[in-house]
Amino acid sequence: MVKSKGKTPHVKNGIVSKGPAKTSTEVAPKEILENVFNLQWHSVIALGVFVGVYLKCTSASIPSGDAGDFIMAAQHFGVAHPPGYPLYVTAGYLWMKLLPFGNPAFKLNVLTSFIGGLAAFVVYLATYKITNFIPSAIFASGVFGFSHLIWFHSVGAEIFSLNNLFCGLLLYWVVRFQQADVTHRARVAMEASFLSGLSMCNQHTSGLFIGVIGAWMFLSLLKDKAITMQQFLKTGAAFGAALTPYIQLPVSAYFANAPSTWGDQRTMAGIIKHVAREEYGTFRLTADDTVSGDLFGNMATYTNDLVNELTNVTLVLCVLCVSTAWYFPKIRTIVYVYVANMFVYIMFFCNQANIDHSRELMKGVLERFWMQSNIPVSILAGCGIWCVYSPVKERCSSLGTALYYLLGVGAVVMTAYQIKNNYTICDMSNNYIMRDYGRKLLDAMPANGVLLVEGDMPSLTSRYLRYCENYRPDVDIVDQELIGFAWYKPMHKHNFRQYIFPYDREVYYKDVLARKGEKFAFSYNFQSVFDVHTRAGIPLYIYPFMKHGDEGYKEHYDLLPTNMLYEVRHKQIAYTVDQFVDIASQQDYNLNENMAYCDGTLYPVRSWEYVIAESCGHTAFFPPEHAHRMITLGNAYTDPKNHPTLVKIYKLYKRAHDALTITEGNGTRNLFGPDHNKNFGVICYLIYNNLVNINKDEAGKFAKVMVEQWEIYFARTSKPDTDGLNRVIADVYNRYPDIKTDEKYLM
């Protein structure tokens, strides 16, 4: 046997190359430059397109969702909701210090747009590295990056774009690992381990990808006997080192003194509780104990959303790739690893996600988590194009060239189709609905008052304006949900100027019924809160409702609608119906501005923007509906002396109706729900019934409005509450056959 002198041939991708084999500890600068990110001209163009479009569509102010929480945490180096997202918060904190222009929300939105563009770009790189085929890369990144979900959540301050980036990078490292020399795979696995640790500092759902990819890499290294114990320990150390951003949690708790922070991470127990999401429910999507995971319902939602987001063409190409991968050794293993990632993620997440499918908004919460699984689907679809092209190219070079350009054009057309379909709904550059909504809430507050908010959007939006833009600094904002945690007072008491905690040492006790036994000497409920502020003369207001389950206050307090808010008022000093109507008549309910932005049809029904738009319109009816209920208690409306009060209430309804009527083409449209039409009609019926035997012509005017409102109600509701309404309408038409045409019945 003849031995070679000085040079040992080694194998890379099945090709014997000259030169000495590199050991696993060697670092090859050329390989790092060429094989990690091979930025050829077309990939640079792709990066520019994604980042450029996302920046063009970046939200100008605070977006919906959890954005307010992340912006406040990044602005003040606070702790975001569980598990804390320390990497995103820290990066945002540094970025917001460096960017010299824009409001705090815009600054973090810009960073997120950059990250989102990079995530779509990584999909391009991964697909191209697998196939070495530009049309595949264009198609995969185009349908993914310009789908509604990815695009929409990449232009506002959310953690999903960073999660997409890490998951895309992990899938890219799968390709690097598979295509690397056996002797270099341990180093590639170490790099993937470091990326995995960083990804766990953002969104924990990436752990489902990490589990599959990590197990495959480890088994592959064992099979090839390509890893030593030292390398294995280094790989684990790389993962641990990447978790260091979690230091941000205790650092913030001890030193930041942030005006908005979640939890108390001054102890190891507090850190573990936060990172494990115990206050939300570990391995659950929401803290709602009444809803359990629905595997088949969630899978049906995912399948439907997959088609809507990525199109049928993408799904067909993905199936084609998976079903033919066995015949293409170049992509076979990578495809199977990607499929395993998708399967584990979808099955686990669909089984654990406890979402109420009866609410479109909650479906919107669920669909945000499909982005992670859409990454491998898009890449596999791009590979499906290559699976069509490759056999043709092998058999006929000239036909393959023609097919190359045809598929390239098709990929560009598909990308343009996604852009055309989703640009309008994803362009947030002029969307100020959340900012305006928060300002209206705070503008409705009297000076030096306390606002008790319930729900994420009112809380996050108003607190962002208060603590990041210093809007209405005289108002204290207290979250009714957060007040239930033991850490709320020690971590937030320094934020408040007016708000008074009922006792020196206490915890708001969630189970109000158990409080009757006084198990906890320092527990309190909202009646205690109301009492202490009433005695101190501090204005206390509620929006949009009181926390469910704590209703003991109702014996002593009324919640009176005033503007967009409810005023907390002791029954001993409550208004009479006439006093309330007179005060409400002097208010503008914030209706002196253009209310067209409250048109819910401008937004997807699963979005918070849609919910807020609908809520803004409905708040205009709070005062008249409350006065309506007050006067009808005990049949007080039948007393003739109350006729002037009924007319005043009608005028309140009319003001709300007119303020929420917009011109649309050649007609008009009212921006409120069907129940408002019904209730508006009811108050007109009460006045009509009061007048019909006294002044027939005057009664006819109210009858005309009543009929119109009830007809709109019937048209708008799928299950109309007839309850004699049709009979009353028929009687009106019998009494006033010319009510539709005679102008004397106009108000």
Image: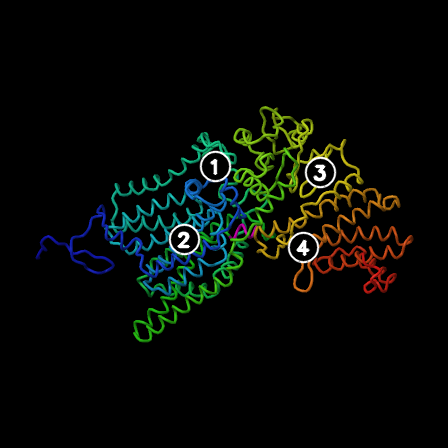
* Tag 1: amino acid: His
Q: Which residue is mark 2?
A: 119
Q: Residue furthest front?
A: 101
Query: Disc 4 and disc 2: Cα gap in Å?
Result: 38 Å
Q: Position of residue 440 (x, y in %)?
A: 62, 44
Contact between marks 4 and 2 (CB within 8 A): the answer is no
Query: Disc 2 and disc 3: Cα gap in Å?
Result: 48 Å
Within-10-Å neighbours for mark 1: few <14, some 14–19, many 20+? some
Q: Of the numbered discs in the image, which one, if any, rests on residue 671?
A: 4
* Tag 2: amino acid: Ala
Q: Reading the chain from its start, which is encountered first: label 2 or label 3?
A: 2
Q: Position of residue 195 (x, y in %)?
A: 36, 46
Q: Which residue is mark 3?
A: 559
Query: Disc 1 and disc 2: Cα gap in Å?
Result: 27 Å
In the image, is residue 365 part of the stretch drawn in magenta?
yes
Secondary element type, mark 4? loop
Q: Which residue is mark 1?
A: 76
Q: Which sits in the foreground, 396 or 159?
A: 159
Query: Disc 3 and disc 1: Cα gap in Å?
Result: 34 Å
